[in-house]
Image (cartoon, rainbow, N blue to C red):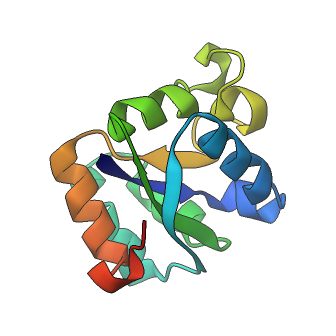
Amino acid sequence: MQETFSIIKPDATKRNITGSINMLIEKSGLRIIAQKRIKLNKDQAVQFYIVHKEKSFFNDLVDYMTSEPVVVQVLSGENAIERYREVMGATNPENAEEGTIRKQHALNVQENSVHGSDSIENAKKEISFFFKSEEIVG
C-alpha cells in the first residue's frame, strides 16, 4: 500500500463540501488514514509552497491558502499517488474528466478544491509537514 497527501482547499471548506469530496476519495478505493481541519498561518503556507516562491502566483496562493480552514489528509491504497491524481482531475476544472473532484467542485484553476502529491518523495515530505507518525492510523 502506498500513501499520498491531500489538502481539501479553502474554497471547498468554505462551501462545506468536505464530506462530498471525502465520499469521492473513498469511492475510488482510497482510504483516509489521517485527517485534520486546520487554519494555515502565513508562515506555514510560505514554507509549504516555497517551491513556488519565484512564480508570479506565489503571494496569491499564500493568501488563498490562509483565507479559510483546510483539511489535510493522508490517503492510502494501491498506487495511491496516481489514483488520487486521477480522482482529483485536471488542475483546470474545464479540462477535468466527468466524475472527478475538480469537475464536480472546483470553481477555477486556483480554487480547484483539492491538492495531491505528485510523487513518492513529495508525498513523504508533505505528510511529514503536517502529521506525526502516531497520527497516521490505517
Does residue 111 show up? Answer: no
Side of 114 where 16 appears, left or right: right
> Toward the viewer: 37 or 26?
26
Q: Residue at x 72, y 46 (%)?
A: 23
Return the x and y of residue 122 as percentages of the image width and height.
Answer: 22, 51
Q: Where is residue 32 drawn, in percent x and y?
A: 53, 58
Regarding residue 46, the answer to whether it shows in the image is yes
Residue 115, compared with residue 85, is above or below; it is below
Residue 39 position, x and y percent, is 58, 81
Q: Nearer the viewer, residue 26 or 124?
A: 26
Q: Relative to 133, is 68 on the left or the right?
A: right
Q: Quadrant of residue 124?
A: bottom left
Q: Is residue 35 above or below residue 6?
A: below
Rendered position, 50 above or below 78: below
Say which residue appears at 70% left-offset and 37% top-offset.
106
Q: Position of residue 138 (x, y in %)?
A: 43, 65
- Look at 36% across and 78% down and name the residue there: 131
Number of labels in the image equals 0
Choose top left, top right, bottom left or bottom right for residue 136. bottom left
Identify the residue shown where x is 57% and y is 26%.
92
